[in-house]
Amino acid sequence: MNSKAQSVKNLLLVLGMAMALLLINTQLSAQTQVEPAYQCTPCGCSQDNVIVHAAGNCSECGMKLININNPSEGLNYTNLYNYQVCDLIANTEDLLILDVRSEGEYTQRTSQIGRFKGAINIPINQLEKSLKELAEYKGKPILVYCSISARSPRASQLLADAGFTDIHNLIGGLNAWNQAEQETLPCQETYVERK
C-alpha cells in the first residue's frame, strides 16, 4: 500500500475513533443529566415537600418554585446555604442582616432559637411600609432570614420588587442553622446570639 493510501486509511481510522468517543460521551452526558426538580420554598403549606419537574408557582401559596439543584435559578435574589452565609457575613462590608420574624421571636420572648448578631427586626407584615427606612441599602448587601424560610423568601422578593439589588436569603432559616452540625458550620455560634 502506498503512503498516500496509508495516510487516508489512518485518517479514517482516527475519524472513526473520534466519532465513537463522541457518541460514548454524548450517551454518558445524557445518562448523568439531572432531571429538574422544583419545590416550594417552605411556606408552611401542604405543598412544601412536593417535588415537581417543571418550573412554576406553588399551587398553595403562589410563590415561585425553587429548583432544588440550583436554588437561585430565575430569582431576583440569591438563596444561600448555611456555610455560604458564614462567608457572606465574614467577608461583606455594610451587610444589613434583616430578621423578618415577629417582634416576639426576635426578642426571644416567644421563641428561643436565637438571632443573628447585629440584625435589625422588621416583621414581614410591616416590611412593605418600612421600605423607606431601608432605602440606603438599595444597592448594598442584605441578608434576610426567618425561622424556617417561609417568610424570608417573600421578604426577599418584596425587596427585589422594590428595587433592592443585592439580596441574600438564608435557606431553611434559623432552624436549619441551629440543626447543622458544628463540623459543617464552624461559624454557627460566632454569628448567632441566644438569651
Image: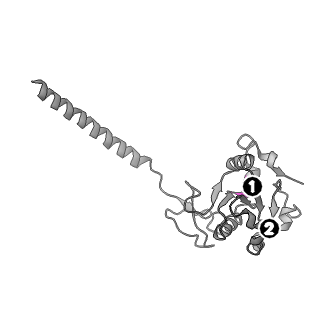
Q: Are marks 2 and 1 in contact (CB under 8 Å)?
A: no
Residue under the point 87% across and 53% down: 194
Q: Residues within 10 Å of mark 2 (few under 14, many from 20)?
A: many
- Residue type at mark 2 is Ile
Q: Is residue 122 left or right of residue 65?
A: right
Q: Of helix, strand and loop, which mostly describes the magenta segment?
A: helix
Mark in front: 2 vs 1: 1
Q: Which stretch did the figure color magenta?
A: 171-176
Secondary structure found at label 1? loop
Q: How many numbered marks appear? A: 2
Q: Looking at the image, which is closer to me, 59 or 195?
A: 195
Residue under the point 71% across and 66% down: 151
Q: Is residue 173 magenta?
A: yes
Q: Is residue 134 left or right of residue 194?
A: left
Residue at mark 2: 122
N-terminal label among 2 and 1: 1
Q: Quadrant of the N terminus?
A: top left
Q: Residue furthest bottom?
A: 129
Q: Position of residue 29 (x, y in %)?
A: 40, 46
User: Is 179 placed above or below 111 here?
Assistant: above
Q: Position of residue 189 (x, y in %)?
A: 81, 46
Q: Looking at the image, which is closer to me, 117 or 30?
A: 117
Q: Is residue 53 left or right of residue 121?
A: left
Q: Looking at the image, which is closer to me, 45 or 10?
A: 10
Residue under the point 12% across and 28% down: 4
- Residue type at mark 1 is Leu
Q: Quadrant of the C terminus?
A: bottom right
Secondary structure found at label 2? loop
Q: Which mark is residue 95?
A: 1
Residue under the point 59% across and 58% down: 72
Q: Position of residue 41 (x, y in %)?
A: 63, 63
